[in-house]
Image: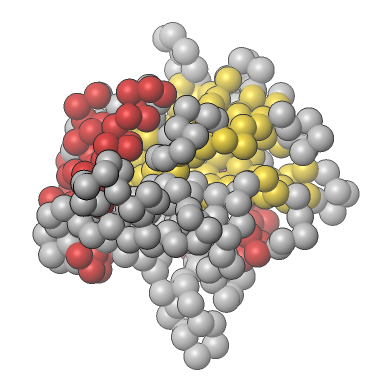
Amino acid sequence: MQLADLHMSTGLGHCRDPVPTEAETGQKCEADPRTLEFVERLLDEEKPDMVVFSGDQVNGETAPDAQSALYKSVKLLVDRKIPYAAIFGNHDDEGDLNREQLMALYEDLPYSLAVAGPEDIDGVGNYVVEVLDWGKSTHSALTLYFLDTHSYSPDERQFRGYDWIKPSQTRWFKNTAQSLRRKHQEYNHIHMNVAFIHIPLPEYRSSGKYFKGSWMEPPTAPGFNSGFKDALEEEGVLFVSCGHDHVNDYCMLEQDDNSKPSLWMCYGGGVGLGGYGGYDDFVRRVRFFDFDRGPGRVSTYKRLEWGQTEAKIDEMMIVDGGTVNSPEEAT
């Protein structure tokens, strides 16, 4: 379960572009209670084994007490004993706590898998989570990579907008993946690698490629391409999922030089009523990834806060047999 862009505030929060304006007639929209009610419903219906906070959990501008804002969403998981990982977006540290301080909170919380990561590379929150096979196995069946995409461009004159994954992070990722690959070769079944970031990669802008879902706003990816998409493909990552652009919720297929499927690039879709919506009556949503470790399959779909609340939106299989699944085979 990926929770993208919760935008929690200190207090109740202010609803931005809610659909519908009132969840119940005569009831004023309060952003955080309504967001948490939505998340809580899906936690109880879907019963996920793990949750990924993919950035902008805290809406720093409206969170003078960022700690209380962070705790709101985490409490739902702690109460249900669900493990979770977290990375940061560009708004998390705009309140009274910086990234290091926020990560220190995550590291001390129950059921948290989040860690600051190596101090000698750029960013806070570059780390790996290994998911073991069923039973008493000591072999990893699934590796999840988490990377900090930072905030705003350090060179606004040349590259306007948002920051990018740095060379030190790419080296760390490749070295880690290559080291783990040797261990994963001892596993008798199919091992899978996936990744989560906050700000989309520049390749998310490639509108001519196959995609499924909603493309409602131009992807606000970095103006500088540091080549991390290539690194993901080289190290056998099957999909990468981001947040940041709230009203985009598509999955897009990358292909290699031989036109073979090489990487799915997905958006989670904005969850929080405290973040913007406003495009074509956008309804808040949550993306799920369902892993079937035996045959090495991954399916994905979204659930909505309003309207078709029982439906699995845009459900499709994106990985089969441990390899990236083509659109023709995705159902």
Res 235 seen here: no
Provide residue 326's location: percent of width, then percent of height: 77, 37
* Rendered position, 179 above or below 159: above
Return the residue found at the far top. Answer: 135
* Rendered position, 207 above or below 292: below
* Rendered position, 1 above or below 99: above
Res 295 seen here: yes
Toward which corner of the image does residue 55 lie, by quadrant?
A: bottom left
| Left or right of 293 on screen, residue 93 | left
Return the residue found at the far right. Answer: 258
Toward which corner of the image does residue 151 lie, by quadrant?
A: bottom left
| Left or right of 31 on screen, residue 236 | right
* Rendered position, 314 above or below 167: above
Return the residue found at the far bottom. Answer: 157
Taking depth in this image into account, of 253 and 257 the one nearest to the observer is 253
Q: Residue at x 66, y 32 (%)?
A: 316
Give the position of the N terminus as an image quadrant.
top left
Give the position of the C terminus as an image quadrant.
top right
Provide residue 291's location: percent of width, then percent of height: 55, 25
Q: Residue at x 67, y 45 (%)?
A: 212
Q: Residue at x 56, y 64 (%)?
A: 217
Toward which corner of the image does residue 106 lie, by quadrant?
A: top left
Provide residue 74's location: percent of width, then percent of height: 23, 39
Taking depth in this image into account, of 293 and 26 the one nearest to the observer is 26
| Left or right of 37 on screen, residue 266 | right
